[in-house]
């Protein structure tokens, strides 16, 4: 009888969630499909679900202790949903979905389950595109930083270049650092990947945050190198190196290099800090995989 009641309650909750957020989630998926800056969004929910499934033994062992704080979190998230709907602001309505999920876990299962599932729930934030005003401002800033860095590297390589904002004028071609070349795409993807690597393989919160944030300078510097390399390739081999397959291939190469640098940073932290203790609640033989946040 208890199991049937729980199943009925879950079905009602799921139906209400889909009724409220169904259209929002469909539009979110459409943006993942059309916006390359957030195409990684398709991978975020399955990874979060896998991380939660990985903790199934700890979840079963934990004693459920429902918390009213979860109900407050649900109400706050629903208020965010209403405010976002009235203001036609997609970011807040989408973010409220994550808040409702987190609040439900806290209200139904309690703080122990909530702590175990905190990272998988927080990881879902990476599937939510930033507000347009913030995204555009970040893109413009990254364009200028990448252009300036590319200019300095080209001068270091003894290649004549004149920069005007995000436009680099070489002797044979003018390169414009567009939105797509600002590095915002690789930055968003690299932040997602680095946070996952940090959670899985770093045992302490400080090291996890440090490794995640290192994605920012790594992405910026390597994008500047990509722009400089494009200028050098154009000077050596001709203007065709600034477009087509060669240009796309350089983007993939830079992202792979950025991922490699994240691992180098992780190795350097271990060398400097020395072996860290196993995370709270984790197994000594697999500290990152079973660690609590």
Image (cartoon, rainbow, N blue to C red):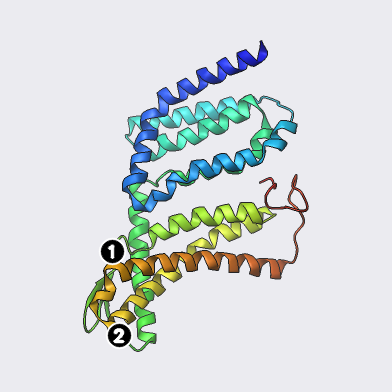
- Answer with left or right where residue 32 lies relative to residue 277: left
Residue at 35% x, 89% y is 158
- Left or right of 196? Residue 30 is left
Element carrying mark 1? loop
In the picture, residue 86 is in which quadrant? top left
Disc nearer the start of the sequence (2/1) = 1
**Front one among 192 and 160:** 192
Q: Is residue 164 visible?
A: no
Query: Percent x, y for residue 160?
Result: 28, 86
Q: Contact (CB < 8 A) between labels 2 and 1? A: no
Residue that sits furthest to the top in the current view: 1
User: In the figure, residue 178 lies in which quadrant?
Assistant: bottom left
Percent x, y of residue 237: 28, 83
Q: Tell me the residue at 49%/31% (across/down).
A: 77
The residue located at (65%, 16%) in the rendering is 3
Quadrant for the N terminus in the image: top right
Measured along the vertical axis of the image, is residue 247 above or below residue 6? Answer: below
Say the numbered circle drawn on residue 236.
Answer: 2
- What residue is pinned by disc 1? 178
Within-10-Å neighbours for mark 2: few <14, some 14–19, many 20+: few
Dot 2 falls on a residue whose secondary structure is: helix
Q: Position of residue 180 (x, y in %)?
A: 31, 60
**How many marks on residues?**
2
Tell me how far mark 2 sits from mark 1, CA to CA: 22 Å
Image vertical order of residue 246 relative to residue 186, above or below: below
Q: Give the camera-side residue of 96 and 52.
A: 52
x, y percentage for residue 26? 36, 34
The mark lying in front, picked from 2 and 1, is 2
């Amino acid at each position: 009888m208890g199991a049937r009641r729980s199943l009925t309650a879950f079905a009602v909750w799921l139906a209400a969630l889909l009724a409220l957020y169904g259209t929002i989630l469909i539009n979110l998926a459409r943006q993942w499909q059309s916006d390359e800056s957030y195409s990684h969004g398709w991978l975020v929910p399955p990874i979060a679900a896998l991380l939660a499934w990985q903790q199934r033994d700890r979840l079963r062992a934990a004693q459920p202790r429902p918390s009213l704080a979860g109900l407050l979190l649900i109400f706050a998230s629903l208020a965010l949903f209403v405010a976002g709907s009235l203001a036609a602001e997609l970011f807040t309505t989408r973010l409220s979905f994550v808040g409702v999920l987190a609040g439900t876990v806290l209200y139904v299962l309690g703080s122990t389950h909530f702590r175990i599932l905190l990272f998988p729930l927080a990881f879902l934030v990476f599937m939510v595109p930033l507000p347009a005003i913030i995204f555009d401002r970040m893109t413009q800033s990254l364009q200028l930083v990448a252009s300036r860095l590319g200019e300095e590297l080209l001068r270091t390589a003894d290649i004549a270049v004149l920069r005007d904002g995000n436009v680099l004028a070489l002797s044979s071609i003018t390169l414009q650092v567009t939105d797509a070349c600002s590095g915002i795409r690789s930055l968003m993807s690299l932040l997602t990947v680095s946070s996952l690597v940090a959670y899985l393989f770093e045992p302490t919160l400080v090291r996890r945050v440090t490794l995640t944030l290192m994605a920012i300078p790594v992405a910026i510097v390597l994008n500047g190198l990509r722009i400089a390399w494009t200028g050098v390739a154009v000077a050596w081999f001709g203007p065709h190196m600034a477009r087509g397959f060669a240009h796309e291939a350089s983007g993939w190469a830079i992202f792979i290099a950025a991922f490699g640098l994240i691992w180098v940073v992780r190795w350097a932290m271990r060398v400097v800090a020395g072996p860290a203790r196993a995370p709270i609640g984790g197994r000594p033989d697999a500290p990152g995989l079973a660690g609590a946040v």
